[in-house]
Image (tube, grey):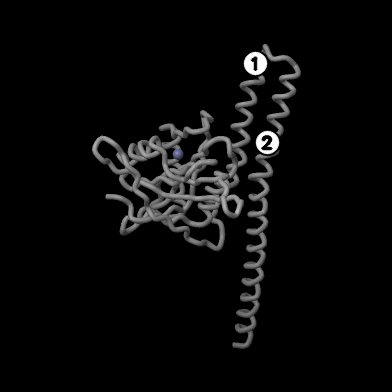
Amino acid sequence: MAVSAVHLESDAFLVCINHAMSTEKEEVMGLCIGEVVLNRVVHVHSVIILRRSDKRKDRVEISPEQLSAASTEAERLAEMTGRPMRVVGWYHSHPHITVWPSHVDVRTQAMYQMMDQGFVGLIFSCFIEDKNTKTGRMLYTCFQSTQKGSEYERVEIPVHVVPRDAISKMCLDSAVELPHILCQEEQDTYRKIHNLTHLDPITKIYNGSVFTKNLCSQMSAISGPLLQWLEDRLEQNKQSIGELQEEKERLLQELATV
Ligand code: ZN
């Protein structure tokens, strides 16, 4: 039976957006961790950012090893939170293209649904421009697949972003992991070309500067917003400490008058 709706918590949503905005050249991908509750509603509490083994513009794949590592992580989170957490779906980005799933996406989704009926797919379309206002836009959708004859079709699933006043520990860990993963991917690519012996010194210097440039653009796209996020959280924490301290003093005064 199809899922009736997806509730995506705002902190998990922010991690997805941050990840999707990290590159406009290739698609990025991750897995959603959460729980399926009554009425077949999927709650997404957190996401796991996946490292790409093969960077290609229009293709994303999850290896069985990654899926099993994600399940282990979900089990750990279930223990930590005391909730029945598991891998409930996957997400990927569509830079510069429509938000709707491709035929490959619909088929991939159908394959996941064979293993788990409640599995959902989220897509974030980014780096697209609104023709009227000339401003950047980000669109997202959630889907499942259904079989029509010998073909598969997409079924749109309503997705609601659920506001949260603070970022959870799970989401914060994923967000902090993102710059690490991106940096590793860049290093791997650079190492591969750097070890080619037939290259002349000028080409090597050029490759080195491309590597540095890529790291710098990642820093401004990812680490900047992340730092701002952490500063906001620090500010929020300071405020709650202040409020709690006031409350404590008020209670102490009350106690003294009793
Ligand atoms: Zn796609």
Q: Is the C terminus in the top left, top right, bottom left or bottom right quadrant?
A: bottom right
Residue highlighted by disc 1: 196
Q: Position of residue 39 (x, y in %)?
A: 31, 59
Left or right: where does residue 38 sit relative to residue 204?
Answer: left
Q: Position of residue 156 (x, y in %)?
A: 37, 50
Q: Amino acid at mark 1?
A: Leu
Q: Residues within 10 Å of mark 2 (few under 14, many from 20)?
A: some
**Relative to 6, does residue 29 appear above or below in the rendering?**
above
Query: Based on the displayed image, in which of its 4 quarters is residue 83 positioned?
Result: bottom left
Q: CA distance from mark 2 to mark 1?
A: 21 Å
Residue depicted at x 66% and y 45%: 223
Mark 2 lies on a secondary structure that is: helix
Query: Whereabouts is ligand 1, in terms of quadrant?
Result: top left
Is ligand 1 within 8 Å of the beta carbon of the residue shown at mark 1? no
Mark 1 lies on a secondary structure that is: loop
Residue 215 circle label: 2
**Relative to 236, does residue 42 appear above or below in the rendering?**
above
Residue 255 circle label: none
Residue depicted at x 44% and y 52%: 44
